[in-house]
Image: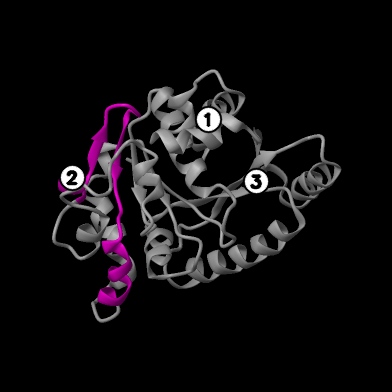
Amino acid sequence: MAKIFCIANQKGGVGKTTTTVNLAAGLAEVGQRVLMVDLDPQGNATMGSGVDKRQMALSVYDVLLESASVAEAAVYSEKCGYHVLGANRELAGAEVELVEVERREKRLKTSLAEVADAYDFVLIDCPPSLSMLTLNGLCAAHGVIVPMQCEYFALEGLTDLVNTIKQVHANLNKDLAIIGLLRVMFDPRITLQQQVSDQLKAHFGDKVFDTVIPRNVRLAEAPSYGLPGVVFDPSARGSQAFVAFAQEMVDRIGKL
């Protein structure tokens, strides 16, 4: 039975997509069956998984409008070792089209239930805004993974996200919880980052993942080649950190 996780943060530019594709590749690397769902109309997670968003016959848009199933729309990325339910510009229109339909916030959850036995992990890359797309992701998920830079403003963004998750938990999805906070783009030489990291651990305890993703040039270069860093350069520090994070996820989920 697949465990479904949203990678979400209402603050932009914190590495959500980088986290999603590299965790997907890392989980595939440690032997897990993975589906990556791109819920962002920009389609960056799709392109970063070696899938051309312009060439897709079917996308997550078709799944949300119930004109295709996940099994029909998902494609296998040979280079990355996981399945991709991709997104492109069409998805921006789904926001408007879903306004009038029934069960609009549960469309993704219903569709993913049909393929729950085909995967070990489903990772959902959410857009930064709290939209109908993000709501579909949060309603479908068992938990939220929050990538965070250890900076002051990131703490403010985290407060907003925690409140959103509480509201969704209370009204739409009783299973939803924060699985953990992942410290990304981390540079231990910067005193403020170390201080914020210590604050996170003091406040959230074991909700903070042990693995820390360092600031790494190879991870930043990888998307321009249409690959996760884990595939593009497996020897890079950032790539190795994501494989370690994938293993930590597998271990943590086993204890839930």
Residue 139 coordinates in the image, percent (x, y): 40, 62
- Specify the amino acid type for callout 2: Ala
**Residue situated furthest top in the rendering:** 235
Q: Are marks 3 and 2 in contact (CB under 8 Å)?
A: no
Q: Residues within 10 Å of mark 2 (few under 14, many from 20)?
A: some
Q: Residue at x 25, y 81 (%)?
A: 100
Q: Is residue 149 above or below residue 234?
A: below
Amino acid carrying mark 3 in the image: Lys
Judge depth for marks 2 and 1 and give the one in front. Answer: 2
The three-letter amino acid code for the residue at tag 1 is Asp
Residue at coordinates 31% horizontally, 58% vertically from top-left? 109
Q: What SS does tag 2 mark?
A: helix
Check whether the beta carbons of the residues at disc 1 and disc 3 lie within 8 A of each other.
Answer: no
Between 115 and 10, the one lying in front of the other is: 10
Instruction: Pinpoint residue 37: horizontal percent, then vertical percent.
Output: 34, 48
Q: Position of residue 74 (x, y in %)?
A: 23, 44
Foreground mark, 3 or 2, reads: 2
Residue 71's label in the rendered image is 2
Q: Is residue 249 visible?
A: no
**Which residue is under mark 3?**
207
